[in-house]
């Protein structure tokens, strides 16, 4: 079976599945059926394409970062500019698709979780433009460190619910969103922001995000006449990475590297490179947990990567050795952040700053005629306070 | 027929509905929770449901989440829960059903977990986030180990799925009274009583139907039993009293009152 053909019966090999309380079962069935129907629907496709183009700004540019390439000293580095998409991150791609789908199946209300706030902002703007009531769950710790995004969501008319349970970060926001959904399944769509959660979410989110990789393929073909040699993207839940990788899944000459949050001495959020197999938030995948199965607290400078799990499709890619998963520490992310600002005049979000650092390392080991694409998943306005504090 | 099912059916013949109280193992501490389990037995529990603390309890409302947070300080592993069960079994014969999220079970290993259940005297296991599709193997191994696996159904479960769930469930079918997480705040409405009636006609007679989520008063318990449920499960209402520091005697009295609601 080709890698691009997964999931099979809701599973990516042994990963994925639908480990949820029974109350959510009908809603997941309904979503899966609706998705299968609208996936083939020309009008739906056209509507989504129009939103992506005229409202979202797609296609995003593929930019040859000449100065970054010089500094790295190796392969030609291209940046996939998802930071230029409406809302400031790749989150838009998935949100518009899911929100339109939710509207088609008659839901009146969107709920979502958010870590860095980018997914919350994207969901809020979709809620505004499609006239759907929107509620965002966000951990208290993240509310503190991503304040501008909280205000942005409120301006867009969403209600932000602060979650204070557990570690008060992304995983707890997901717990709370799942609880809300359990009580309101009939009128509410849970708009998951990454390739995580129970089937069909990892598949749906990947399919809406694959536009990143599809565009890279076309754009690089025009510029270089061939496939890239290496793709690099950061991985928290893993949606921008899966969107980047998936269209190249069966192109074996293209190397894939996912960059996880290596954190610091106190902890990390590197589920694939440090974790073990387990079940959380509806899917079997790699998790950061203790040997009794309790989920452990994570640490990352970037709220968007601060999650103890990872999408099940990444777990499969790791298992079959299709992608390599490495880490960048908080410090390295800050180096990547500054490097990009200084050499290219682009302030990245702290999440893709991890990918910038790792991408430059990899590029330096490659030949000048080779190409490496880093997905710049979002812009860094939201992180200015965090970075200012760290640099002072 | 499974032992738990037999027991519930016996109670149905003599005494109305079965009364099934829930406690979180290790809440507020491992030692103290043994006193509370004694109180449940003394108050007339026909079956005791024992929660396994988990860091991310998505099916639970605030009350049981808080209990889990208290309990995790002393009871953060299944092995510790089994130690507690061993002590319970030295003096209490009431059937015990563990309610755990799947991940702790997966980490211990399904086979080892079921062996431990048998060895320590656990009669049934409810894993709310392990549906029959992903849990097929576990359910089969549990049947072989004579450990019951009640499955959850809801008022929104369609006929086809209900048939599947009823076929695979052993011990009893756990009917969730309403959409949402565990919690005592809402009463028992028409949706619940209608669902009980309709589900009772679709589920084979030898599989008891027990109702939980949102039951908090003797009156609520009575309503679901009158509507045809074979048993009533009360969790959050008891757990919140434990959280407020009620003494075991007070819990025993409360359980006895709730139990009255099952006697028609």
Image (tube, grey):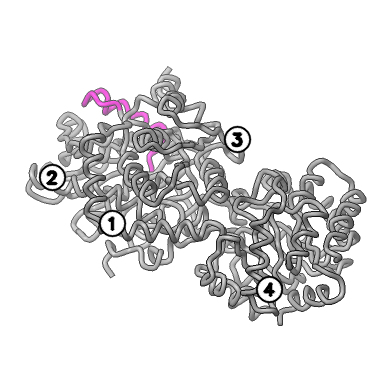
Q: CA distance from mark 1 to mark 2?
A: 26 Å
Disc number lying in front (1 or 2): 1
Disc number lying in front (4 or 1): 1
Tell me, yes or no, whether the two marked residues, 3 and 4, touch with CB atoms within 8 Å: no
- Chief secondary structure of the magenta portion: helix
Q: CA distance from mark 3 to mark 2?
A: 45 Å
- Which comes sooner in the sequence, label 3 or label 2? 3
Q: CA distance from mark 1 to mark 3?
A: 38 Å
The chain letter for the residue carrying disc 4 is: B
Q: Are marks 2 and 4 on the same chain?
A: no
Pointer 2 residue: A220
| Residue A175 showing in the rendered view | yes
- Which comes sooner in the sequence, label 1 or label 2? 1
Q: Are marks 1 and 2 on the same chain?
A: yes
Tell me, yes or no, whether the two marked residues, 3 and 2, touch with CB atoms within 8 Å: no
Name which residue lies at 71% across and 66% down: B210
The tag on residue A164 is: 3
Give the quarter of the figure containing the C terminus of chain A. top left
Q: CA distance from mark 2 to mark 4?
A: 58 Å
- Which comes sooner in the sequence, label 1 or label 3? 1
Residue A342 covered by magenta stretch: yes
The chain letter for the residue carrying disc 1 is: A
Q: Is residue B43 above or below residue A226?
A: below
Left or right of A342: which side holds B92? right
Q: CA distance from mark 4 to mark 1?
A: 41 Å
Give the quarter of the figure containing the N terminus of chain A. bottom left
Tell me, yes or no, whether the two marked residues, 4 and 1, touch with CB atoms within 8 Å: no
Pointer 1 residue: A39
């Amino acid at each position: 079976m080709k890698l691009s053909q997964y999931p099979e019966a809701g599973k990516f090999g042994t990963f994925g599945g639908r480990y949820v309380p029974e109350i959510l079962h009908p809603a997941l069935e309904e979503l899966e059926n609706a998705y299968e129907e609208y996936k083939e629907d020309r009008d739906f496709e056209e509507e989504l394409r129009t939103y992506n183009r005229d409202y979202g700004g797609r296609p995003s540019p593929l930019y040859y970062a000449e100065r970054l390439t010089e500094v790295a000293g190796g392969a030609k580095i291209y940046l996939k500019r998802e930071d230029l998409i409406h809302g400031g991150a790749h989150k838009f791609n998935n949100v518009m698709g899911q929100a339109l789908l939710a509207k088609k199946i008659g839901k009146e209300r969107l709920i979502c979780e958010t870590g860095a706030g980018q997914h919350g902002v994207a969901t809020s703007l979709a809620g505004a433009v499609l006239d759907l009531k929107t509620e965002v769950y966000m951990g208290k710790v993240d509310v503190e460190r991503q304040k501008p995004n909280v205000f942005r969501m409120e301006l867009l008319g969403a209600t932000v619910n602060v979650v204070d349970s557990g570690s008060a970060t992304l995983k707890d926001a997901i717990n709370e969103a799942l609880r809300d959904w359990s009580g309101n399944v009939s009128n509410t769509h849970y708009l998951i922001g990454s390739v995580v959660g129970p089937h069909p979410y990892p598949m749906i989110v990947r399919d809406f995000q694959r536009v990143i990789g599809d565009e890279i393929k076309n754009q690089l073909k025009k510029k270089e006449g061939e496939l890239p040699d290496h793709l690099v993207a950061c991985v928290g839940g893993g949606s921008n990475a899966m969107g980047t990788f998936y269209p190249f899944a069966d192109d074996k000459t293209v190397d894939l590297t996912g960059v996880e949050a290596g954190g610091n001495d106190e902890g990390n959020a590197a589920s694939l490179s440090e974790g073990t197999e387990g079940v959380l938030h509806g899917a079997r995948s790699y998790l950061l947990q203790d040997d009794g199965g309790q989920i452990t607290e994570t640490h990352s400078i970037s709220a968007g990567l601060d999650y103890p799990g990872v999408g099940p499709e990444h777990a499969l890619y790791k298992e079959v050795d299709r992608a390599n998963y490495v880490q960048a520490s908080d410090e390295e992310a800050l180096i990547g952040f500054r490097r990009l600002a200084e050499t290219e005049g682009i302030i990245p979000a702290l999440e893709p700053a991890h990918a910038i650092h790792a991408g430059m390392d990899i590029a330096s080991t490659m030949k000048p005629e080779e190409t490496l694409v880093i997905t710049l998943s979002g812009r860094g306005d939201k992180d200015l306070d965090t970075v200012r504090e760290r640099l002072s | 027929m499974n032992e738990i099912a037999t027991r519930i059916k016996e109670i149905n013949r003599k005494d109305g509905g079965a009364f099934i109280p829930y406690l979180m193992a290790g809440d507020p501490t491992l030692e103290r929770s043994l006193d509370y389990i004694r109180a449940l037995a003394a108050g007339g529990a026909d079956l005791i449901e024992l929660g396994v603390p988990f860091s991310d309890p998505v099916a639970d409302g605030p009350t049981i989440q808080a209990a889990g947070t208290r309990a995790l300080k002393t009871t953060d592993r299944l092995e510790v829960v089994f130690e507690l069960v061993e002590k319970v079994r030295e003096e209490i014969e009431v059937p015990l059903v563990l309610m755990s999220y799947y991940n702790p079970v997966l980490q211990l290993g399904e086979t080892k977990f079921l062996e431990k259940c048998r060895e320590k005297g656990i009669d049934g296991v409810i894993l709310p986030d392990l549906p029959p599709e992903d849990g097929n193997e576990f359910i089969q191994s549990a049947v072989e180990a004579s450990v019951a696996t009640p499955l959850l159904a809801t008022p929104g479960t369609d006929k086809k799925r209900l048939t599947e769930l009823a076929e695979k469930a052993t011990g009893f079918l756990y009917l969730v009274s309403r959409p949402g997480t565990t919690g005592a705040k809402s009463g028992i409405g028409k949706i619940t009583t209608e669902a009980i009636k309709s589900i009772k006609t679709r589920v084979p007679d030898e599989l008891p139907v027990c109702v939980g989520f949102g039951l908090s008063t003797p009156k609520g318990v009575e309503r679901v039993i009158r509507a045809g449920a074979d048993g009533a499960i009360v969790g959050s209402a008891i757990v919140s009293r434990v959280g407020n520091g009620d003494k075991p005697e007070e819990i025993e009295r409360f359980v006895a009152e709730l139990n009255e609601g099952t006697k028609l």
